[in-house]
Amino acid sequence: MATNLPVQSASAQTLQTYRFPRDKLRLTQSDPERCPLILVACGSFSPVTFLHLRMFEMASDFTKFNTNFELMGAYFSPVSDAYKKAGLASSVHRRVDPVAFRYIANSCRLRMCELACQNNWGVMVDPWETVQTGYTPTAAVLDHFNHEINEVLGGVERPDGTRVPVRIALLAGADLIQTMSTPGVWSENDLDHILGKFGTFIVERIGTDIEDAISNLQPYKDNIYVIQQLIHNDVSSTKIRLFLRREMSIQYLIPAPVIEYIEQNELYLDDSSVDGKGKTNGQGSGRASPAVGSSSKS
């Protein structure tokens, strides 16, 4: 049964007013024989697409039919603007006070995620990572969810009234596991923390060799769950921004309320950062603490 607390819009929250979203979170298990599970999708979501939403649906089916998990809820955790990924800076209103730049850039992506899942069964938007003033490694984001759900809320309740901890896991596309298997992209400590303590559900993607990637992550193979796309979808935020820049239609690629929001606020019209891969020159794709020997900051 989901909680019935009043909902505060994620896009309206700040670091000072933050509240953990739990309006769609089920706190009582239906099947005591299964392990309760929460899935967390980290990313830019600039903008959020139907594939992002489909990932949760595919994961829900996968856990139900192929695992011993019971899905209790799921979350979008959009990155902070401090991530400095291509396409983030352009996700602001064109007519904006520069002083308010960071807040509005964050709130735009949060609001689009909210609009995308407003009628969804159990997907929520957590603004905690987004409102941070600095970049937050994925490992720390998963720790945050573990703290809020298992320490603050005390886990979930079984039908007999006993309480059990919830398994927190990362939900991501196949390109993420590929970067994790590439030496130097992720720090060894973060890899061990994410894959060893939490685990990940990976949705396959066209053009990515998942088996090859997992072969380099053998110590964690039991914590890596691969979800097949039975209907392939390769839409991406990068392609959406490219279509918008070229004044092409994005109907039926992203949710209608998100399209309306983009049009009303004139987002992405001057997005010159799109290079076909969604990265700025020289930028890696791992969302982690710096690898050993790296001089970059997290």
Image: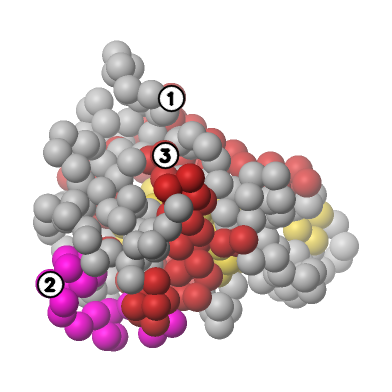
Mark 3 residue type: Ala
- Mark 1 lies on a secondary structure that is helix
The image quarter containing residue 121 is bottom right
The image quarter containing residue 92 is bottom left
Mark 2 residue type: Arg
Residue 196 in view of the camera = no
Q: Give the farthest residue toward the right.
A: 161
The earlier-in-sequence mark between 1 and 2 is: 1
The earlier-in-sequence mark between 2 and 3 is: 3
The earlier-in-sequence mark between 3 and 1 is: 3
- Mark 2 lies on a secondary structure that is loop
Q: Which residue is mark 1?
A: 189
Q: Which residue is mark 2?
A: 246
Q: Is residue 265 left or right of residue 124?
A: left
Please give the name of the residue rendered at 14% of the width and 38% of the height, measured from the top-left corner: 281
Region in magenta:
239-257
Characterize the local packing of mark 2: few (<14), some (14-19) or many (20 or more) Cα atoms within 10 angstroms: few
- Circle on res. 82: 3
Give the x, y percent position of residue 205: 22, 62
Q: Give the farthest residue toward the top.
A: 293
State the separation of the CA atoms marked 1 and 2: 42 Å
